[in-house]
Image (cartoon, rainbow, N blue to C red):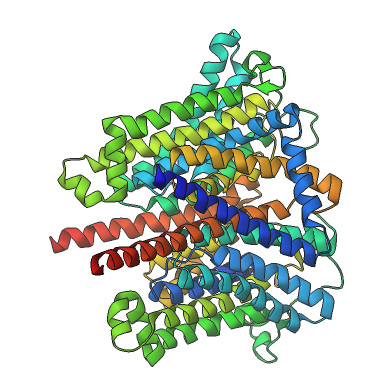
């Protein structure tokens, strides 16, 4: 418990430092930082509607974040979330264009299709590693670029919408849209269920235990009888499926069609979320929502105070760096203080 | 013949930024740093090069600004990874995002545009005409009229090669990567070596960025480094940092890029644009197959 509290305090301190740095930048540019932050949070948390938007926007952040966290904590350096997201989105879109089922069947069908799309893309990288020992952190990155061009091609030629000004597909069939309850989009509900499942697998099953041990010390895990190679493939497929699901839910909740540049906004966000969350599953959920608050509020900030919304991208990067740095620094500081105290106790 | 010359020139111009940033990556590779911030250094360099060239009406100052822009990112890298001991991978990813954010933010703040900025007031880095050689058929068409930065990349390859393998600093650089503790105990601070290697890497990435924005085009567009930093990282890993090897691999990637432009008449451009990334995967594939064979021979 004391450990958790300390963790929370360190994270808050890191975020505070990052915001102070942001404020300094704003003062230099002649903006009022207090007004700016007020506009930022007012726009994303000011009323129920805006908070519902925050939840809806947090879905791709949380799911790609979970994908990265599970991967990094288990060993495989899967950096392919952007590509896997795009393939998931494409699979869901194509399914939604050509298949017509009642909603109850259509939505699960498209969600599974999205996961298959993502898992296919991460599975290729996994196979390349297993068969030819090609490092996944390079292959997944290259496959991100390939997925980018491939989906661009798919929406320009085979699945394009006639008479559209720029490359995009037609809308998917209405039975595949995520239902809304008032302002609440059920895509967040799906995310929450997935979060619980992942948490359970990761912390409460033998598989999850094996993954975590392999991530911490693969030699120890191997000597303990863990089948590293099989687990590697499972983790790659699962994390690809998570990123693919993120893509599918973007399509089904948001524009209901594949538009050019769809994944660009989420490119590295999942990896950033997992890093700042130190690959913790619960922390990934919280930071996913927090980053969504920042991104959703960025628009309001720009509308009210004229501070360009791009500042938030800078702020996010600063938060990641400062929080990770202060985590290391404060942990070191605390253990120093503890050691001194122990020494005193002994000498007394 | 003209097609062939065009292909070679396309290859050289596509290879130049990858070669420069990969040489920078090689220096940090030897120093034992897992440096993935080349992408961010290049992007920042590309932006500040345009800034300098536009405000001072001078390409030389543009190039200087490009280098300073890359050094800015390197400075933050040093602060976090060398001083504060943050994980190098986290620092790299954070800084790449920081560069994307910083350049798009400044693009709007300073130039009041979104997406891309171009202006007749931006001066590009000149091409070098070689007076007698340009008359020689074929060879003249290739060697003469290349951009100044192409020559810088060529010279940098030789310099880095000499520097790493033939100087005292090069020895210390490799020692820092090979056995950091041993170097520290012999009285040379490995942190200092790492810092210098990162700064040199930034200078090279600054040239690479300048080439992107003031070399074959005169504009800055959002995220214009487009994964070249990652390709250069792959190049470094493929040849374990050897500068001459890096030059060859960069030319191979450049060829894939140049070939893509020609194949656009036959295939959709989306597929031809994939070529450099597929070439990277292919190169990695052959590298791994080769490694496997070597291991089997040893066993």
x and y percent of residue B258 in the render? 59, 61
Quadrant for the N terminus of chain B in the image: bottom right
Quadrant for the C terminus of chain B in the image: bottom left
Q: Is residue A163 above or below residue B40?
A: above
Residue occupying the far top of the picture: A102
Q: Is residue B78 above or below residue A81?
A: below
User: Residue at point 66% right, 77% down?
Assistant: B68
Q: Is residue B167 visible?
A: no
Residue occupying the far front of the picture: A348
User: Residue at point 72% right, 55% down?
Assistant: A311
Which picture quadrant has residue A39? top right
- Direction from residue A60 to residue B183 in the image, left or right: left
x and y percent of residue B123 in the render? 80, 76
Closest to the observer, A157 or A265: A265
Q: Is residue A177 above or below residue B89?
A: above
User: Residue at point 24% right, 65% down?
Assistant: A346
Q: Is residue A322 above or below residue A91?
A: below
Closest to the observer, A52 or A128: A52
Q: Is residue B280 visible?
A: yes
- Direction from residue A17 to residue A323 in the image, left or right: left
Which picture quadrant has residue B132? bottom right
x and y percent of residue A29 in the render? 81, 64
x and y percent of residue A285 in the render? 52, 37
How many numbered marks are there? 0
């Amino acid at each position: 418990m004391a450990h958790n509290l300390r963790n929370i305090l360190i994270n808050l301190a890191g975020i505070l430092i990052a915001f102070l740095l942001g404020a300094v930048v704003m003062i230099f540019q002649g903006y009022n930082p207090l007004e700016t932050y007020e506009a930022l949070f007012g726009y994303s948390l000011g009323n129920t509607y805006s908070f519902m938007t925050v939840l809806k926007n947090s879905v791709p952040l949380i799911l790609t974040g979970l994908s990265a966290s599970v991967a990094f904590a288990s060993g495989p350096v899967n950096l392919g979330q952007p590509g896997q997201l795009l393939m998931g989105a494409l699979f869901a879109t194509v399914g939604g264009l050509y298949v017509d089922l009642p909603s109850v069947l259509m939505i699960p069908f498209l969600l599974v299709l999205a996961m298959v799309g993502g898992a296919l893309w991460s599975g290729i990288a996994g196979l390349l590693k297993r068969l030819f020992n090609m490092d996944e952190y390079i292959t997944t990155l290259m496959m991100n670029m390939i997925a980018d061009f491939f989906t661009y091609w798919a929406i320009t030629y085979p699945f394009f919408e006639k008479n559209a000004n720029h490359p995009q597909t037609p809308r998917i069939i209405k039975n595949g849209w995520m239902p809304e309850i008032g302002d609440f989009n059920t895509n967040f509900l799906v995310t929450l269920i997935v979060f619980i499942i992942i948490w359970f697998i990761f912390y409460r099953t033998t598989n999850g235990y094996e993954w975590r041990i392999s991530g911490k010390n693969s030699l120890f895990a191997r000597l303990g009888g863990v089948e590293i190679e099989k687990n590697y493939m499972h983790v790659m497929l699962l994390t690809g499926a998570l990123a693919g699901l993120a893509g599918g839910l973007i399509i089904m909740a948001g524009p209901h069609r594949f538009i050019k540049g769809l994944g660009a906004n989420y490119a590295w966000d999942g990896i950033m979320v997992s890093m700042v969350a130190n690959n913790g599953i619960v922390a990934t959920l919280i930071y996913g929502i927090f980053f969504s608050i920042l991104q959703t509020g960025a628009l309001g900030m720009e509308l009210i105070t004229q501070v360009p919304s791009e500042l938030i991208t800078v702020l996010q990067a600063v938060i990641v760096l400062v929080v990770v740095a202060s985590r290391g620094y404060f942990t070191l500081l605390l253990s120093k203080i503890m050691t001194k105290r122990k020494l005193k106790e002994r000498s007394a | 013949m003209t097609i062939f010359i065009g292909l070679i020139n396309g290859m050289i111009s596509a290879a130049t930024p990858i070669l420069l940033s990969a040489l920078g990556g090689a220096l940090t590779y030897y120093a034992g740093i897992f440096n993935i911030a080349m992408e961010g250094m290049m992007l920042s360099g590309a932006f500040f090069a345009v800034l300098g060239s536009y405000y001072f009406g001078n390409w030389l100052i543009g190039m200087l600004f490009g280098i300073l822009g890359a050094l800015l990112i390197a400075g933050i890298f040093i602060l976090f990874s060398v001083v504060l001991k943050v994980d190098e991978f986290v620092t790299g990813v954070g800084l790449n995002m920081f560069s994307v954010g910083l350049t798009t933010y400044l693009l709007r703040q300073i130039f009041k545009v979104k997406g891309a900025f171009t202006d007749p007031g931006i001066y590009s880095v000149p091409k070098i005409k070689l007076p007698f050689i340009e008359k020689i058929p074929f060879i003249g068409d290739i060697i003469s009229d290349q951009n100044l930065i192409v020559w810088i990349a060529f010279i940098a390859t030789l310099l880095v090669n000499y520097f790493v393998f033939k100087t005292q600093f090069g020895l210390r650089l490799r020692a820092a990567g090979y056995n950091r503790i041993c170097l520290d105990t012999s009285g040379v601070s490995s942190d200092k070596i790492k810092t210098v290697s990162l700064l040199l890497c930034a200078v090279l990435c600054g040239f690479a960025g300048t080439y992107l924005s003031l070399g074959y085009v005169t504009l800055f567009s959002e995220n214009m480094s487009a994964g070249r930093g990652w390709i250069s990282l792959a190049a470094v890993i493929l040849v374990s940092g050897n500068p001459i090897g890096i030059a060859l691999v960069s030319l191979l990637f450049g060829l894939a890029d140049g070939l893509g432009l020609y194949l656009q008449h036959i295939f959709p451009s989306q597929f031809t644009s994939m070529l450099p990334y597929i070439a990277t995967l292919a190169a990695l594939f052959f590298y791994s197959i080769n490694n496997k064979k070597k291991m089997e021979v040893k066993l």
